Structures are given as C-alpha cells and as structure tokens.
Image: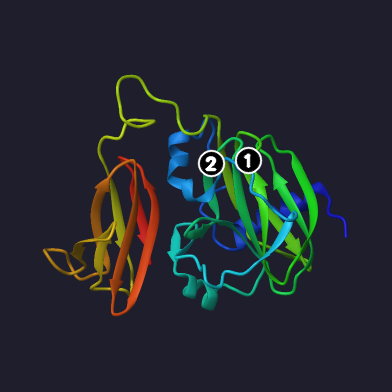
C-alpha cells in the first residue's frame, strides 16, 4: 500500500501527539544548533567507522546483553519494566552500549544502530524527515521481534524516523546531527583534552518506589538515600567530575540500576527509576 507524503506527515504528527511519549518536537527551536560537545554525552550511541554487516537488516536478540535502562521523553525505566509495561507494539529505538533511547546528538558522518521491534515481522515501510523537510522512504523486511538497522548521520540538523508494519506505526526517534568534527577541536589555550574540563556535573536520581538505595560512582560508595541528612524520599543528588566518563549505580535489596556515559560540566542530569 502506497503512502502519500501528506499522509506520512499526518502519521508522524499523530504519533508524536498520541503515540509513545517522546520529549522532542520534530523541529528544533529557531536558531538552535547542536555542538560536538553536546554529542559527547551520547558517545555510547554512535561510532565514526561504518560497522561491518551481513546485510541491511539483521536479526537481533537482547538476551544476554539487555540494556541497563530505556529512555523516552523525560522517563527512564529498567529493561524489565519496559518489557512488562510497553513491549508488544511496533517500536523504534536507538541502541547504545548500555541503554536504548529515542533521541541522540551525534557528529556528522557517524553511524548508529536502530532497533525496530514488531511482534509478527514482515514488510515495513521506513520514513525519514530530513532537516530541510524532505521525506525519504524505504522498505525493509523485518524479523519477528527485534531487527537491527544501521543509520548514517549524513546531514547536519534534525532527522525524524518512524516505520509502519501491518498498518501500525511505531514511535518516532530523533537524531540531531552536529556540524563540528569528531572529536571536538581543541579550544584556545592549554589543556590536556580535546576541550576544557573544568567544573562538575550534577546528577539527580529520582524514584517514586525505590528508596533507601546506596549510590556508587565508578565502583566507589558515595552515599545512601535517607542518610547523612538526605531525606528518605527516593531522590538523591550528587556531583561528579565534569566532562568525564562515569559509571553510576544505585542498589538496594538485590536490585540495582546503572547509567554510563560522559557527564558534561555544568549540566544537570535527572535519572528517573
């Protein structure tokens, strides 16, 4: 069945309004650009070398390599919560080293892995809106369950992607592509890294049900929810060295949740469990 351009735009609009929550509009605010430094927060989601593949679409099973977290809109949930609550309808994700998300910032010329889930498999129509409004469509045959598809960030600006299978749309994902090279160019003056690294990043863990957990940064205990003056309310605030890669983990009663990535100085990260 052929889809007209106008029908696809209406489909994208309906998914963004009524479908799986997503924290971004299809177009960035006027005058907004994306920097290479912003992309450093998503280094676990892209690579600068084209991956070796056996075809355009590859069957994928998360068994044994389950993501530590699933992020969409302003929510972050565990993989088990995602399976029990959201799995079962067509869905589209950007796969990272330890998590899946629906929006990334990445450099021009980088490669990402898309994960398309459909319960029954079969033919699917993929649509991509380019930054200038062009609509690109292509068809793939998807496996039952998860299929992995390579995506190249080939144009600066915001790209919006969605697919339909069995007349059902997936959620949309957003790829914001930066114009700067990678890694970012050195700034003026001396410095040990590709960009200045002063200051710290703020991280706020928040949960309505998980309380009294211990907090670890790079394997070291730093505190506990409900101790040392912190109220027992499921929220714990800490700071980490900025512009550095960290592994953050909270655990209690045999349950644990973790997040890995580069945390930029001066930025506040809110991690919901």
Label 2 neighbour load within 10 Å: few <14, some 14-19, many 20+ = many
- Cβ–Cβ under 8 Å for marks 2 and 1: yes
Front residue of this view, candidates 106 and 160: 106
Horizontally, is 220 left or right of 57 in the view? left
| Res. 14 image quadrant | bottom right
Front residue of this view, candidates 243 and 191: 191
CA gap between label 2 and label 1 equals 8 Å
The residue tagged with tag 2: helix, strand or loop?
A: strand
User: What's the residue at 61%, 69% (across, down)?
Assistant: 61
Residue that label 1 marks:
153
Horizontally, is 211 left or right of 114 in the view? left
| Up-down relation of residue 39 to residue 238 (above or below) | above
Front residue of this view, candidates 86 and 78: 78
| Res. 167 image quadrant | bottom right
Front residue of this view, candidates 206 and 116: 116
Residue that label 2 marks:
106
Horizontally, is 187 left or right of 53 in the view? left
Residue 145, how many percent across, how many down? Answer: 67, 71
Q: Quadrant of the N terminus?
A: bottom right
Q: Quadrant of the C terminus?
A: bottom left
The residue tagged with tag 1: helix, strand or loop?
A: loop
Q: How many marks?
A: 2
Label 1 neighbour load within 10 Å: few <14, some 14-19, many 20+ = many
User: What's the residue at 39%, 55% (across, down)?
Assistant: 260
Residue 7, how many percent across, how many down? Answer: 79, 53
Residue 63, how many percent across, how many down? Answer: 56, 73
Residue 64, how many percent across, how many down? Answer: 52, 72
């Amino acid at each position: 069945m052929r889809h007209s351009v106008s029908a696809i735009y209406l489909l994208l609009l309906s998914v963004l309004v009524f479908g799986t929550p997503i924290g971004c509009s299809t177009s960035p605010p006027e005058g907004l650009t994306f920097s290479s430094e912003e992309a450093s927060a998503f280094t676990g989601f892209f690579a600068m070398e084209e991956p070796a593949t056996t075809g355009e679409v590859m069957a994928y099973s998360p068994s044994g390599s389950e993501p530590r977290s699933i992020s969409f809109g302003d929510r972050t949930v565990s993989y088990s919560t995602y399976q029990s609550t959201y799995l079962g309808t067509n869905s589209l994700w950007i796969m990272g080293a330890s998590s899946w998300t629906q929006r990334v910032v990445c450099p021009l010329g980088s490669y990402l892995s898309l994960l398309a889930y459909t319960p029954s498999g079969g033919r699917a129509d993929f649509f991509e809106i380019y930054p200038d409004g062009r609509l690109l469509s292509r068809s793939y045959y998807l496996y039952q369950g998860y299929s992995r598809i390579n995506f190249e960030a080939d144009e600066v600006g915001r790209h919006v992607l969605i697919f339909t299978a069995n007349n059902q749309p997936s959620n949309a994902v957003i790829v914001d592509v930066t114009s700067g090279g990678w890694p970012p160019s050195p700034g003026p003056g001396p410095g040990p890294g590709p960009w200045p690294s002063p200051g710290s990043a703020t991280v706020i863990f928040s949960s309505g049900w998980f309380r009294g957990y211990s907090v670890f940064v790079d394997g070291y205990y730093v505190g506990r929810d409900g101790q040392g003056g912190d109220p027992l309310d499921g929220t714990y605030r800490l700071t980490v060295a900025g512009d550095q890669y960290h592994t953050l983990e909270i655990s209690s009663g045999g349950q644990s949740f973790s997040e890995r990535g580069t945390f930029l100085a001066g930025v506040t990260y809110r991690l919901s469990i």
